[in-house]
Image: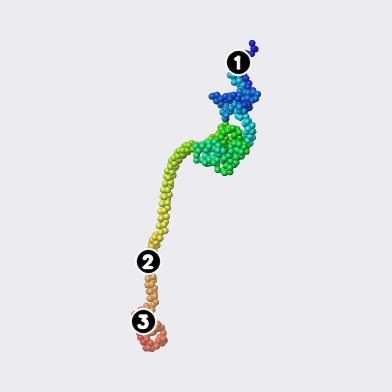
Amino acid sequence: MPNEPAITVSQLNRKVKTLLERGIAKLWVEGEISNLSRPASGHIYFSLKDDKAQVSAAWFRQRQRGPAIGFKNGDKVLAFGRVSIYEARGNYQLIVEQMEPAGEGVLKQRFDALKKKLLAEGLFDEERKQEIPALPSRIGVITSPSGAAIRDIISVLGRRFPSIPVVVYPAAVQGDAAPGELINALETAIERDECDVLIIGRGGGSLEDLWAFNDEALARAIADCSIPVVSAVGHEVDFTIADFVADVRAPTPSGAAEIVVPDQHDWLRRINVLASRLARVGERAVEDRAQQVDWFSARMVSALRQQLLSKRHDVQTIQSQLVQLSPAVSVQRSIARLATLRQRLAGGTNEALSELSHRVALLGRTLHSVSPLATLDRGYAVVLDSDGKAMLDASTAESGDEIRARLSKGELVANVTKVIKE
């Protein structure tokens, strides 16, 4: 009897499985596919062999990425996975997580090296990526004009938002000349500056088919592009350097078309919702403004009334002033003053005339008292010569001269008969 208790086969296989999975890290294994089996479960079972040995392999459905259906017996592949054991049978096997044609191994190393280099330079940083416009006015597509990608893109754009024009910048998307043509098309789009966003890409294919989009010069041109760039290369599982440097990566060309434009129906619904909200806001604003208008109107009416009353008072004052300054009033005042002056003049004149009459009478009496006429009244007479001059000296007369004697009443005409001189 053994000193230690025996273990079951299941326990043994479990121990072996644990040792294998812990002792051997995940790794790449190169070999040729044989005994390929595809059961209805979707899993793929096969053997990997070289000229000296073989190992069982299982590629479960949930781990399959890319064109797994294209692998067949005799293909040389690179399988990446972990070593394990199928406990039920004790079969040692490779659990595959990723598989690609063996010829792609060198390309993959170049891809990883370039990716690491550009990542270190910051060309993949999110901070340097540009925003895609919400509704571009024109869309540029850099791809082969005869490929399936351009048909898919135009179809999706036409369905989602047909009013947005599309400009195609033709370029080869496969082969040695493809990177240069893609760069030239990108430079043309930048120079013409007629698009708001660019889609660059192609349909699916092998790693060699997509290799043009792993070109370093093209990657740097995309990173330096002043127009936002959407990379749409291959299928969802395909990744290229262009995807990492572009502003946005789309899983497929059709997906890129869906990214760069909104669905017109969703857009219209959003517009209708916004229009309804705007209408409600407008109605509330109108109601609020209506109340404000009523309040301001009442204040304005009150203010206008006060102003009208004030202006009316001012007008009355001005009218009163104008009446006072009116020529008619001035004439009336002048007429009144003239009447007053006339009365004053008449009274003054009468008074002056009375006083003058009194003075004249007094002067008349005074003058009369000294007048020769008064002497005549006392019986004297005034002798006048023929010239009517008073004769003061008798020697001035001669006999026969006619003389006149003025009496108090009447005159006497006589001839000198004798002159008696003193």
Q: Nearer the viewer, residue 236 or 103?
A: 103
Residue tagged by mark 3?
406
Q: Position of residue 326 (x, y in %)?
A: 41, 59
Choose top left, top right, bottom left or bottom right for residue 354.
Answer: bottom left
Q: Where is residue 222 drawn, in percent x and y?
A: 60, 38
Q: Secondary structure at mark 1?
A: loop
> Image quadrant for the N terminus?
top right
Quadrant for the C terminus, please: bottom left
**Can you name the residue that lies furthest to the right here?**
52
| Pointer 3 or 1: first along the chain | 1
Q: Which mark is residue 8?
A: 1
Q: Residues within 10 Å of mark 3 (few under 14, many from 20)?
A: some
First reached walking from the N terminus: tag 1 or tag 2: 1
Q: Position of residue 148 (x, y in %)?
A: 54, 36
* Residue 346 numbered mark, or none: 2
Question: Which residue of the protein is positioned furthest toward the top in this rendering?
Answer: 1
Residue 38 is marked as none
Q: On the image, which quarter does residue 16 sit in?
A: top right
Q: Is residue 127 visible?
A: no
The one nearer the camera, 290 or 387, is 290
Inspect the image, locate mark 3, and give the three-letter code of the amino acid beneath it.
Arg
Circles 3 and 1 in contact, beta carbons < 8 Å: no
Question: Distance between the Cα atoms at labels 3 and 1?
Answer: 207 Å
Circle 2 — which element?
helix
Query: Disc count in the image?
Result: 3
Q: Distance from label 1 to label 2 (Cα)? A: 167 Å
Of the pair 373 and 262, the residue shown nearer to us: 262
Tell me which amino acid carries mark 1.
Answer: Thr
263 up-or-down from 98: above or below: below
**Residue found 42% across the figure and 51% down from its top:** 311
Circle 2: residue type = Ala
Closer mark to the observer between disc 3 and disc 1:
1
